[in-house]
Amino acid sequence: MTGEEDLRVAYGRRAAEYSSLLGTVTQMDTRDRERITAWAGELSTGPVLDAGCGPGHWTAHLHSLGADISGLDLVPEFIGHARARFPGVPFRVGSMTALEVPDGSLAGILAWYSLIHTPLPVLPVLLQELHRALRPGGRLLIGFFGGPDAAVFAHEVSAAHSWSTAAMRQRLEGVGFTVLDAEDREDPGRRAHVSIIAQRGPGLTADHLALTDQDRPVRH
């Protein structure tokens, strides 16, 4: 399993490359831009977090549309590039497992391909933290590699996981989210893509969480 320090170092070494190749919204798939823009347009007024923002391009895009958004990333080098490229947008270094925001303070969280290196035992902890940070009715948008649940594959930077849509839906519901919709997409020569929009519900008790099986892969 890859720890946060390993990821920080691995991505730090390639942050300049990533920022050059993937650092603007125009380099992204048009369908992703439409999906993320539409999601942001449906959020209530309030602060939004781009969790795992990388080079900061999605943060800057939503900021340009008027969102009260900030970017968070584990990798200082990414944050440095983001601040230099988008000086009017707030960015900070931090972990998705400890967002350091008050309970129920966010109107929305974008976690676009920032769960792909998360070890299976840590995933429910991370999802619970995202749920904690959102206000009731706040919305989460996640994007990730689709495929066999919790399958590990070689990634350019560090080992990554694919997640099945059904299992991720179950995990989100297990920590108190209501899944509003899911998009599955397969393009020739590329790994399957999944995005899910979920809304925070009222929360779950500790006893309920203890009985939830959200960290067990769904078998098909």
Image (cartoon, rainbow, N blue to C red):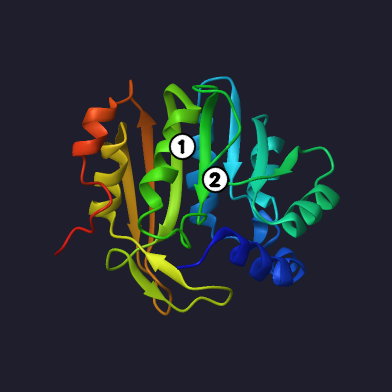
Name above or below for residue 153 compared with residue 79.
below
Is the residue under label 2 in contact with that under label 1 (CB below 8 Å)?
yes
Where does label 1 land, which residue?
A: 129
Q: How many marks?
A: 2
- Whole-percent x and y of residue 161? 40, 66
Q: Is residue 42 visible?
A: no
Question: Which residue does the image show at 66% across and 67% down from the upper left?
Answer: 11
Query: What secondary structure is marked by label 2?
Result: loop
Where does label 2 land, which residue?
A: 96
Query: What's the amino acid at mark 1?
Result: Glu
User: Looking at this view, is 5 or 138 the one in front?
Assistant: 5
Q: Is residue 200 visible?
A: yes
- Whole-percent x and y of residue 53? 63, 50
Question: Which residue does the image show at 51% across and 47% down from the upper left?
Answer: 111
Name above or below for residue 139 compared with residue 82.
above
Quadrant of the frame with the N terminus: bottom left
Question: Which residue does the image show at 21% across and 46% down from the upper left?
Answer: 213
Q: Earlier in the sequence, mark 1 or mark 2?
A: 2
Query: What's the amino acid at mark 2?
Result: Met
Residue 9 picture quarter: bottom right
Question: Which residue does the image show at 81% across and 53% down from the upper left?
Answer: 80
Query: What secondary structure is marked by label 1?
Result: helix
Left-right relation of 75 to 29: right
- Whole-percent x and y of residue 93? 70, 46
Quadrant of the frame with the C terminus: bottom left
The CA span between labels 1 and 2 is 8 Å
- Whole-percent x and y of residue 150? 32, 64
User: Looking at this view, is 96 or 42 the one in front?
Assistant: 96
Residue 89 picture quarter: top right
User: Looking at this view, is 33 or 142 the one in front?
Assistant: 142
The outermost residue toward the left is 220
Name above or below for residue 1 compared with residue 77.
below
